[in-house]
């Protein structure tokens, strides 16, 4: 039996940043996700909260790292998002 492992380029680690949607996630999400061709409804916390609670955001952004489509988040951005995830995705 052959198992193929997909290795992520970078494993995000919380760098100690106190991340909330309002403090620094809104800017990252707006600049990387909210374009007209991607997720135009991701303009506020309520619009993205369903993807936070069902695990889809964490899966696609931190685990699979296939979002945002067509570009990559920086290590700094991934670390901040990991801190946000570790804290339970707080809004404020």
Image: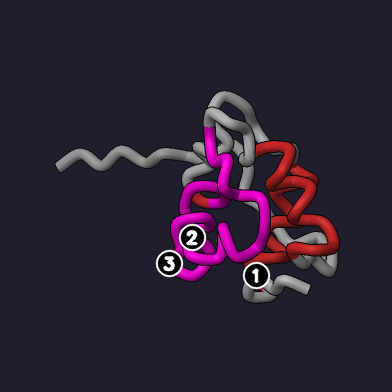
Tell me which segment is drawn in magenta. Answer: 38-62
Q: Position of residue 17 (x, y in %)?
A: 84, 64
Spatial CA distance of label 2 from label 3 is 5 Å
Res 90 quadrant in image: bottom right
Res 86 quadrant in image: bottom right
Vertical placement of 57 versus 68: above or below?
Answer: below
Residue occupying image coordinates x 64% and y 32%: 72
Name the quadrant of the C terminus. Answer: bottom right
- Left or right, 2 with respect to 28, comes to left
Who is closer to the viewer here, 44 or 63? 44
Q: Does the magenta stretch mainly form a helix, a strand or a loop?
A: helix
Name the quadrant of the N terminus. Answer: top left
Q: Is mark 3 on a helix, strand or loop?
A: loop
Residue occupying image coordinates x 57% and y 58%: 48
Residue occupying image coordinates x 30% and y 38%: 4
Task: Tell me the crowding category of disc 3: few under 14, some 14 to 19, or many 20 or more residues within 10 angstroms, Cα based.
Answer: few
Q: Name the residue under label 1.
A: 89
- Left or right, 81 with respect to 39, comes to right
Spatial CA distance of label 2 from label 1 is 11 Å
Are the two marked residues, 2 and 3, in contact with CB atoms closer than 8 angstroms? yes
Q: Position of residue 3 (x, y in %)?
A: 26, 42
Residue 51: mark in rendering: 2
Q: Name the residue under label 3.
A: 54
């Amino acid at each position: 039996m052959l198992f193929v492992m997909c290795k992520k380029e970078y494993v995000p680690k919380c760098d100690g940043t106190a991340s909330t949607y309002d403090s620094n996630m809104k800017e990252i999400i707006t600049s990387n996700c909210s374009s007209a061709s991607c997720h135009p409804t991701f303009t506020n916390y309520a619009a993205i909260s369903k993807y936070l609670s069902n695990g889809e955001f964490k899966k696609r952004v931190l685990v699979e790292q296939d979002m945002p489509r067509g570009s990559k988040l920086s290590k700094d951005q991934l670390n901040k998002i990991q801190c946000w995830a570790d804290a339970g995705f707080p809004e404020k």
